[in-house]
């Protein structure tokens, strides 16, 4: 091996790191280490000039290893790997030290944080000494795509791919396509018909020669890897059907929150307290009637039901405010003299045309009443016989500061969108993660909101977080474009940090075979040693820690690399 | 000098390391004496890693993986759990209190839990005092 010549770069990240970590001290300290040819610090390493600096130094100083101490490798490892590669160094001869998310942002003592940063960089230096160049590998891509979920997002993604001439398997859990949108009457803010919009889409999906739809079907297990996935369907009509595909789109959507959990609203107790979805159904029938078959004279629409409240869901469901305003127009058109009360916590009109829609709605002779989500929810009770209404809502009206009573005959609860109970099954089948709100986690919250950390798996629509139709469609088509690009490319790069068996050290005990979750290791009966199928191996390293003779090497996470990292990581503690 | 316990933590990339990053993005504060090493899966934890950390003078070793059932590689965390149980017994035989080795599940969204975990473990180390191995190392350094 050629003598390691390491360049270390400490990032200030503006003030994000520099405020809590003495970057100058870190630079000086690590500059003293053997094999460190140069150590520098710079304002923003990830910026173009930051990357340029590395590239220039690699050439000018003949560096063959690079360390950047900056944010989490989950954010910029790839950026820097690409940069060093540009300068002719194998991307695996690079290492990052996380001195932002796991240091400057979480500590309050500058000396301690600086000491820790030095430790982390020293550990990285020790580790990178033993890094080995790894060769990129790629596999061919099966041109078919699996789309899970037949709502608007799933259908739009399917059409986009199918129109480009590629095969799509569209899996839907229920007995129909269209998801929630097909049940809506009108859409906001243009008040155009959802059903009219959906009809041609449904027809195109159902009749498209490149789309194969499987209704009442769920996905239980997906095997394989990017470019080459496989699943076997397990429902009665298509029992045992095996599908092969190169990419996956999850578009499983969300479901409406069950408001019976909120006692104050008496959902389930009062027949005329209904959810927004139930009201959509009612609008579909063309008549707005109470359970007694009468036209309601007073209708209240309560916002944020199950949303923005720590007891239920802390997040904002994003679409309910506008849907509530949409209902105003529909009620006003059908019942010109009915009193409408919008009982809201905050009005959120963030989208294109939404604020204008809100302003327009305020002219519809409705009453806006504000409640405090954190203080006291409105309470619905049965009206007395003598009252001229069906129910009464008691609430503390926030703007006037007065406790008031609102007479109502019908209450519409604008329910939150939440995850399906069985979302975990999907998540496990396709190998993605969920956030605390049970939404699928995207690869990068800003720069890659459609991909996931599992190569070849994309997330679109509301399963990634509540969103309206245009946002869902945009995400769906974006995912489709990403997939078409990989199909067009023909091959995709795959994990190179796989395991490898050193035949000379292998004693043939086959422990590795029993612990591998992917059946990626097999026993070569002739040589009497284990062999790793590098295409199946996903690089978890479980075999490496189980191997009694140290014959298995987990590339980029070798024993030697990790042990040297441990050696370095407490350098400043003594 | 005041005793500053050192904790070496091994975090799996998919849940625990992401959770620790989230603690950072949420600007939660925790004790600064923890040193995190990223591994792909808690199943990669080789007993020698843990022993090496103690040998180098760690007062505590923390392993964090995904919650049971959530491992990115299906079941690495179960394998880690089994090894952990054995390792705890083993270090006890070497005279290292078993509380010095901890295993916790941290999901990608549990930044808060992670910061609390670090603080609690630091407290435990403070009550236990320096690990014996560390003390003997220090003697050597003084010599
Ligand atoms: S990936 Fe987190 S424990 Fe396996």
Image: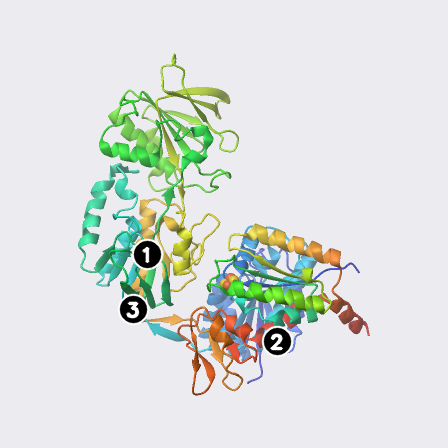
User: Would you say A403 lies left or right of B143 here?
Assistant: left
The residue where tag 1 is placed is A478
Circles 2 and 1 in contact, beta carbons < 8 Å? no
Given the image, what chain letter belongs to the residue carrying mark 1? A
The residue where tag 2 is placed is A36
Q: Position of residue A345 (x, y in %)?
A: 45, 32
The answer to which image quadrant residue A26 occupies is: bottom right
The answer to which image quadrant residue A111 occupies is: bottom right
Q: Position of residue A346 (x, y in %)?
A: 44, 33
Q: Quadrant of the N terminus of chain A?
A: bottom right
- Which residue occupies 26% across, 47% down? A178
Mark toward the viewer: 1 or 3: 3
CB of mark 2 near ligand 1 (< 8 Å): no
Q: Residues within 10 Å of mark 3 (few under 14, many from 20)?
A: many
Mark toward the viewer: 2 or 1: 1
The numbered mark at residue A142 is 3
Q: Residue furthest top?
A: A386
Q: Is residue A3 visible?
A: yes
Given the image, what chain letter belongs to the residue carrying mark 2? A
Q: Quadrant of the C terminus of chain A?
A: bottom right
Q: Is residue A84 visible?
A: no
């Amino acid at each position: 091996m050629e003598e390691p010549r390491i360049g270390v770069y400490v990032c200030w990240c503006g003030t994000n790191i520099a405020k809590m970590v003495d970057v100058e001290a870190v630079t000086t300290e690590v500059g003293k280490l053997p094999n460190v040819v140069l150590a520098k610090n710079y304002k923003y390493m990830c910026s173009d000039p930051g990357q340029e600096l590395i590239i220039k130094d690699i050439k000018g100083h003949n560096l063959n290893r690079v360390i950047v101490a900056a944010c989490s490798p989950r954010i910029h490892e790839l950026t820097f790997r690409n940069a060093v590669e540009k300068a002719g160094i194998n991307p695996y001869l690079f290492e990052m030290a996380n001195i932002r998310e796991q240091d400057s942002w979480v500590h309050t003592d500058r000396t301690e944080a600086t000491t820790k940063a030095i430790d982390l960089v020293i550990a990285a230096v020790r580790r990178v000494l033993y890094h080995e160049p790894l060769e990129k590998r790629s596999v061919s891509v099966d041109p078919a795509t699996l789309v899970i979920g037949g709502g608007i997002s799933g259908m739009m993604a399917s059409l986009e791919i199918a129109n480009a001439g590629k095969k799509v398997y569209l899996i839907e859990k229920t007995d129909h396509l269209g998801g929630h949108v097909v049940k809506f009457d009108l859409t906001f803010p243009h008040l155009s018909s959802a059903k009219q919009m959906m009809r041609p889409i449904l027809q195109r999906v159902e009749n498209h020669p490149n789309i194969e739809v499987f209704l009442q079907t769920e996905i239980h297990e997906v095997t394989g890897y990017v470019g080459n996935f496989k699943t076997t369907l397990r429902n009665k009509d298509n029992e045992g059907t095996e599908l092969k595909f190169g990419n996956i789109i999850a578009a499983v959507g969300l479901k409406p929150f069950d408001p019976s959990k909120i006692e104050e609203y008496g959902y389930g107790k009062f027949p005329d307290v209904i959810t927004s979805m139930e009201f959509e159904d009612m609008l579909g029938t063309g008549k707005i009637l109470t359970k007694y078959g009468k036209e309601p004279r007073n209708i209240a629409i309560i916002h944020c039901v199950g949303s923005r409240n720590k007891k239920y869901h802390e997040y904002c469901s994003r679409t309910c405010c506008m849907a509530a305003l949409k209902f105003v127009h529909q009620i006003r058109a059908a019942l010109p003299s009915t009193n409408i009360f919008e009982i809201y916590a905050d009005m959120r009109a963030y989208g294109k045309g939404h604020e204008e829609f809100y302003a327009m709605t305020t002219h519809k002779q409705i009453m806006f009443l504000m409640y405090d989500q954190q203080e006291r929810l409105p309470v619905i009770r049965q009206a007395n016989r003598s009252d001229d209404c069906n129910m009464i809502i008691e609430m503390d009206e926030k703007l006037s500061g007065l406790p008031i009573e609102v007479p109502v005959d019908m209450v519409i609860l604008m329910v939150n969108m939440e995850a399906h109970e069985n979302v975990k099954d999907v998540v496990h089948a396709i190998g993605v993660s969920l956030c605390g709100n049970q939404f699928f986690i995207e690869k990068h919250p800003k720069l890659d909101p459609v991909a996931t950390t599992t190569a070849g798996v994309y997330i679109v629509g509301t399963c990634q977080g509540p969103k309206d139709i245009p946002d869902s469609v945009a995400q769906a088509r974006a995912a489709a474009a990403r997939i078409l690009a990989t199909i067009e490319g023909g091959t995709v790069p795959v994990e190179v940090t796989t395991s490898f068996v050193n035949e000379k050290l292998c004693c043939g005990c086959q422990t590795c075979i029993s612990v591998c979750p992917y059946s990626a290791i097999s026993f070569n009966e002739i040589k009497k040693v284990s062999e790793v199928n590098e295409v199946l191996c996903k690089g978890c390293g479980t075999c490496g820690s189980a191997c009694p003779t140290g014959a298995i090497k987990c590339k980029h996470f070798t024993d030697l690399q990790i042990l040297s990292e441990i050696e370095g990581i407490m350098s400043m503690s003594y | 000098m005041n005793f500053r316990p050192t904790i070496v933590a091994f975090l799996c990339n998919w849940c625990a390391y992401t959770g620790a990053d989230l603690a950072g993005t949420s600007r939660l504060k925790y004790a600064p004496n923890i040193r995190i090493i990223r591994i792909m899966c808690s199943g990669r934890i080789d007993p020698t890693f843990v022993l090496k950390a103690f040998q180098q003078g760690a007062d505590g070793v923390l392993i964090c993986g995904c919650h049971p059932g959530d491992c990115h590689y299906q079941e690495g965390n179960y394998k880690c759990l089994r090894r952990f149980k054995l390792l705890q017994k083993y270090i006890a035989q070497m005279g290292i209190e078993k509380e010095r080795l901890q295993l916790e599940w941290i999901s990608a969204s549990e930044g808060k839990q992670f910061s609390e975990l670090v603080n609690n473990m630091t407290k435990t180390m403070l009550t236990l005092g320096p690990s014996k191995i560390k003390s003997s190392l220090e003697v050597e350094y003084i010599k």
